[in-house]
Amino acid sequence: KDDSRLCPAERRALKDFYHSVKGAEWTDAENWLSEYNIACNWKGITCNDNLTIIGLNLTHNSLSGKLSSSISELRSLEILDLSDNDIQVSEANVNSFYGSFRFNSKCANSHLLVSFGRELFQKRLDSYYI
């Protein structure tokens, strides 16, 4: 379980995310948590040529619950689109989420675009782009 080759941090972060937003109830959870597929083959995940996760797009997929802070472990994430779902997001949660990426900018790309589908947060998030 603690062997990073078999269970990389990104995969653990995605597993936590899946459970926190009720993955068993999603409209389409193709390949999620499959031990026989790399995370790059899971529904909504985009990877670069090095198989590093750079995008997570699960719009309109019946996600609900609270956004897990473990999503910030996806250090190379460029796009996170969870719009048109029922995820509970508070301003404190968003500030914490963005702050964790901001302080890890050496590991991340030059920007991160996030959509929770709530205009209030989208405006607030503009000031956090790295």
Image (tube, rainbow, N blue to C red):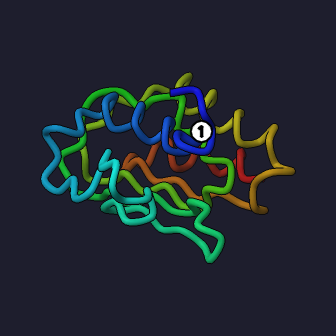
Q: Is residue 39 above or below residue 91?
A: below
Most foreground residue, 44 or 12: 12
Frontmost residue, 81 versus 75: 75
Residue drawn at 44 percent across, 42 percent down: 14
- Residue 67: name its quadrant: top left
Report whether 38 appears left or right of 61.
Answer: right
Q: On the picture, is 96 further left or further right than 15?
A: right
Name the one closer to the observer, 96 or 23: 23
User: Which residue does the image show at 31% across and 30% down from the upper left?
Assistant: 19
Where does residue 66 sit, x and y in percent of width and height?
36, 27
Total labels: the figure holds 1
* Residue under the point 55% across and 33% down: 94
Q: Give residue 98's position: percent from left, percent from top.
A: 65, 38
State the residue lying farthest toward the right.
Answer: 106
Residue occupied by mark 1: 9
Q: Residues within 10 Å of mark 1 (few under 14, many from 20)?
A: some
The spot of residue 51 in percent (x, y) is 58, 67
Q: Nearer the viewer, residue 9 or 19?
A: 9
Q: Position of residue 68 (x, y in %)?
A: 45, 29
**Callout 1: SS:** helix
Residue at position x 43%, y 59% in the image: 38
Q: Residue furthest bottom?
A: 49
Q: Residue lying furthest top in this view?
A: 92
Q: Amino acid at mark 1?
A: Ala
Examine the rendered structure and indicate whether residue 42 appears above or below residue 102: below
| Residue 128 occupies quadrant | top right
Residue 23 located left or right of residue 110 = left
Quadrant assignment, res 53: bottom right
